[in-house]
Image (cartoon, coloured by chain):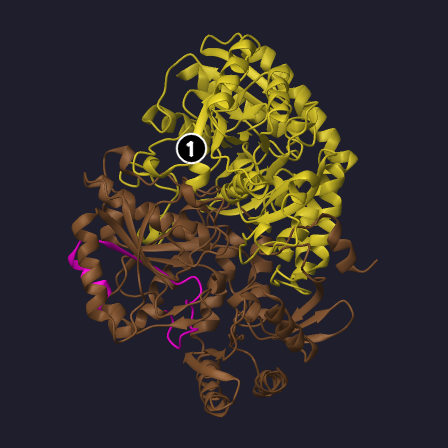
Chain colours: A yellow, B brown
Amino acid sequence: MALKERDKKHLWHPLTQHKTHPDTIAIVKAEGCVLTDEDGNNYIDAIASWYTCMYGHCNPHIIKCVTEQMQQLDQIVFSGFTHRPAVELSEALIDILPNNQNKLFFSDNGSTAVEVGIKMALQYHFNKGEKHNTLIAFEDGFHGDTFGAMSVSGLSVYNGPFEDFFLKVVRIPTPNGKNHDLIIKQLSDIVNTNKVAGFIYEPLVQGAAAMQMHDTHGLNMILNFCKHNNIITIADEVMTGFGKTGKHFASDYLATKPDIMCLSKALTAGLLPMAITSCSQDVFDAFYNDDLSKGFFHGHTYSANPLACRAALAGIELLKSEDMQANISRIIASHQDFGQRIETHPKVASIRQKGIIFALDLDIKMERYGNLRDKLFHSFMERGVFLRPLGQTIYILAPYVISEKQLNKVYIAIEKVLDRI
Amino acid sequence: MALKERDKKHLWHPLTQHKTHPDTIAIVKAEGCVLTDEDGNNYIDAIASWYTCMYGHCNPHIIKCVTEQMQQLDQIVFSGFTHRPAVELSEALIDILPNNQNKLFFSDNGSTAVEVGIKMALQYHFNKGEKHNTLIAFEDGFHGDTFGAMSVSGLSVYNGPFEDFFLKVVRIPTPNGKNHDLIIKQLSDIVNTNKVAGFIYEPLVQGAAAMQMHDTHGLNMILNFCKHNNIITIADEVMTGFGKTGKHFASDYLATKPDIMCLSKALTAGLLPMAITSCSQDVFDAFYNDDLSKGFFHGHTYSANPLACRAALAGIELLKSEDMQANISRIIASHQDFGQRIETHPKVASIRQKGIIFALDLDIKMERYGNLRDKLFHSFMERGVFLRPLGQTIYILAPYVISEKQLNKVYIAIEKVLDRI
């Protein structure tokens, strides 16, 4: 029986209404930018499997490193113990993170990285003798699906059953170059009437909000306001991290650095789940005390899994390489050319780009998980391209190793599909 | 510089007050039951690295399967797509789970498996048109460190900064063979005054509560009460799963099966992080609807990671093998002999055993993370045995492949250390 048939018996897929969803596609092989299904069809993975496999699927360097690690040390409790992959990763990652980041705390996915960041912000104030109970977040932010992470996500599809149990969160709009005074006024009102622990934000590009981009200067102004008001800033770089914006991290575009950063997805080069919440020395120092109870009593069993650490270390080696940086520059330039070409298409309402992230909005309103969106998805798949439209937004976020020929195939698929809707 | 020195610069370890904590130990190799540190010292891993590596570290069968998988397919979005390792794992796992379990939902660790379970229970009622806002949990249960999971954990060390943000949870004591009437009375009161969505419990053995064990008949009675009162039962088998209690799952000892089960830790044979929340067809059916919004809109990027699925599948093959089942029987018998010997030791207050889980309580009161507990830990390490006392409880939960000679070394280390405290 085909895998896609066997799949139906026992598997419950994420973000899926199984009654109305069409059959799943069974992928049997992935190499570089190409996915192969069980019927032998090939697809270009133009969203890098949710922004993870930036150095290409089954990258030989990553596989070699992880295979070696697997024969040496698979797993060890990370309380009271340490190991070489975690130590070497910490040195390599701190080297490329913004200057003020100095400590790394491990967990397993973006949601838990955010939970850790929120808990650090709350306990930071608590340890200094003040209970701050409010968080600030952007209106359309998305930070994950656990209760803490859901609470700060403004963009929440179908949260009805859970919203009675959320943390206290106040939302502000993203800066658009015209609303700075309004945002500062709102922030002033918020701090005057609440004890604010932290501000969590996706810097410059909001992924789940369909690659919405906002103003660098405005975000910097918000971060400055937070610094002056003792509000811990938490940059959720789960999507933006590791080169996608054209710099190693989106925070590199900003003069004011975050107190805490959340990392996952491309962190492990698309091989394995892992997340890191990094922070400044100041945040760490608030927990460093003779009083045991001021420590951070959070922990996951596979924290700092040696295989995932080794994959992440190999990923950073690739990211920093001349080849990969040249790939990134090449994709940025190609997207700019394509942007000029597609901007005038009658079905395109607007385009935007940050680094290798390219998005266009259609001039048609669509449901986030609706039928037209599904039809678009299948039109791309029929043309051998895996793109995953979000509502009326089509975006490209391909692995850095995508060739010019493959990239052109993606562009042409978009143009052809647009011509026909 | 030694790894344990380099470790201090940037790593923030879980469940650790860094100011008072002694140096970490850097492990450079793990094979079978033996860990080797950077100074060449060997230790028997008598807690299987937090109950994960049950088939031994760097198990050749597991490594072979994962190495093959890594060259074929590393990662693919699990919304709209599927793959062989997930399909084959689903078939193998459903085959050994209690009969009523029929669907699997993936996440990355025990905390998220619990968040998924809680969200399923809440939305189950919500989808049927009723908002149930209360959960029932055991007094000393532990279910993880994210906000939802923390909420249901009765055993929560230092939750002060977070407890204002917890879900509504009512606690009941564990059944001890003498308090059945009391518990049923409490449950009746709870359902009379609350809209209860679910009951979450660690079946038969509570891990973080220092391997506390409770009464099978009493738990069965509680589960029956829940069934009759439309309360979704959630068995957290993250610690107990995959053979540790002497059956594949602790729930196998109970006549009444849970609606939902949470699995992690040994699920992936100690190689990689992954978790699964399984459920009955009845739970799944409550989400299966033409109305999109009744679907379960939860998802993590690396859900059903092919490598982790392949490791889990290989793990189940090992668990079911005659060799491994013979190992489990052998360890159970050895523990029984040791129990008889140590029970009369003047420093031992009590012993208990379920399957390969053996625990003894000292007749000395100790802080969970205090100095005497640390001294005990180091006394064992000096004798080449990794045991991790929880307060005054010393427990053994070794890999199934531990030899009789290694097991005797663990027993003797305990006896010698007890003689000297």
Q: In the structure shown, which secondary structural element does the residue marked by tag 1 occupy? A: strand
Residue B75: percent from the left, percent from the top? 53, 46
Q: Residue at x 62, y 59 (%)?
A: A78
Looking at the image, residue A343 sits to the left or right of residue B30; the answer is: left
- Going by the numbered disc 1, the residue's amino acid type is Lys
Say if residue B164 shows up in the picture: yes
What is the tally of numbered marks visible in this picture? 1
Residue B298: percent from the left, percent from the top? 39, 41
Q: Residue at x 65, y 24 (%)?
A: A355
Q: Quadrant of the C terminus of chain B?
A: bottom right
Q: Residue furthest right?
A: B1
Say if residue B106 shows up in the picture: no
Residue B214: percent from the left, percent from the top? 34, 72
In this rendering, is residue A130 above or below B109? above
Residue B221: percent from the left, percent from the top? 21, 68
Looking at the image, residue B254 sits to the left or right of residue B340; the answer is: left
Q: Nearer the viewer, residue B257 or A190?
A: A190
In the rendered image, residue B225 lying in the magenta stretch gets the answer yes
Looking at the image, residue B192 sits to the left or right of residue A211; the answer is: left
Q: Nearer the viewer, residue A178 or A344?
A: A178
Q: Quadrant of the N terminus of chain B?
A: bottom right
- Segment colored magenta: B221-249
In the rendered image, residue A1 lying in the magenta stretch gets the answer no
Q: Nearer the viewer, residue B404 or B366?
A: B366
Q: Which residue is mark 1?
A: A168
Q: What is the chain identity of the residue bearing mark 1?
A: A
In this rendering, is residue A55 above or below A199? below
Residue B207's image quarter?
bottom left
In this rendering, is residue A88 above or below B387? above
